[in-house]
Image: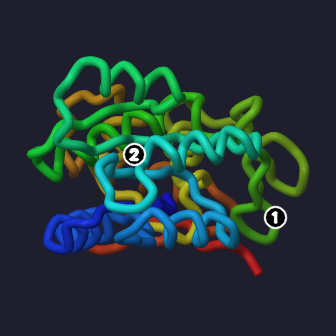
Amino acid sequence: MKILLLEDDLMLNDAINQYLTSVGHQIVSSKDGKTCLEILEHEKFDMLILDINLPDINGFTILEELHKQKRTIPTIFISALLDIEDISRAFDIGCHDYLKKPFHLKELNLRINKILKSSIVPQNHKRLSKQYSFDHDNMTLYFNNEPHILPKRQLMIISLLSKNRSLVVNYDMFREYAYDGDDIDTATIRAEVNRVKKVLKEDFIINIRGIGYMVERPN
């Protein structure tokens, strides 16, 4: 998932960037609101993680500006603001989650995965290989434009990989999305992915040793 991070604390910015990159997300970071808006003018993102208290343009203003442009991007606010009025305003202007500082980095990733699993993230038809494509609107895998029938769990695995083409999908993301957050061991996930790979007529699922799997964006 491609995520834009806005955080003016340099140490926290670096920590979030490194951790989310390590679990398979693509992070673009900014340290001030003006730069954040400039990046949003030229790039598209699957999610925003925005600090609120900034010296120039705060996170509230950035999300409000996006809404004026009719742009909807799933957003998590991260802030030390604990006043209920600030939290209420965050949700009133359209954020999808609010994480109070300090927080554990793994908790941030869990919140991201929860949003990923929801229908908030835009869905469409995506090509996975020369002959395979996946339609998220009707949860159908196609081979040469003909449906390739798979069990529901395997379709969920393909769906998650499709949403994150060119990015590594780690085992925690599979647990949250394909197993409803259950504490499934990694070996079980690997076995299910291997079953998917065996029935595919093209091998487009790449094993990233010790981390998870990915599907490259076809040329």
Callout 1 amino acid = Gln
Q: Quadrant of the C terminus?
A: bottom right
Name the residue rendered at 79%, 48% in the picture: 125
Coordinates of residue 198 in the picture (x, y in percent): 53, 57
Residue that carries the numbered disc 1 in the rendered image: 131
Q: Secondary structure at mark 1?
A: loop
Q: Nearer the viewer, residue 193 or 42?
A: 42
Any mark on residue 116, and which?
none
Residue 88 coordinates in the image, percent (x, y): 36, 19
**Callout 2 amino acid:** Glu
Q: Position of residue 40 (x, y in %)?
A: 62, 64
Residue 155, compared with residue 17, is above or below; it is above
Residue drawn at point x = 20 percent, y = 66 percent? 9
- Residue on which disc 2 sits: 192
Label 2: element kind: helix
Q: Position of residue 63 (x, y in %)?
A: 54, 43
Question: 22 or 214: nearer the eye?
Answer: 22
Question: Is residue 152 placed above or below 212 in the rendered structure?
Answer: above
Q: Is residue 198 visible?
A: no
Could you tell whether 16 is left or right of 161 in the image?
left
Local crowd size for mark 2, using a 10 Å CA cut-off: few (<14), some (14–19), many (≥20): some
In the image, is residue 114 above or below residue 142?
Answer: above
- Quarter occupied by residue 147: top right
The reply, left or right, for residue 101 in relation to residue 161 is left
Find the residue positioned furthest to the bottom.
Answer: 219
Which residue is at the front of the view, 103 or 170? 103
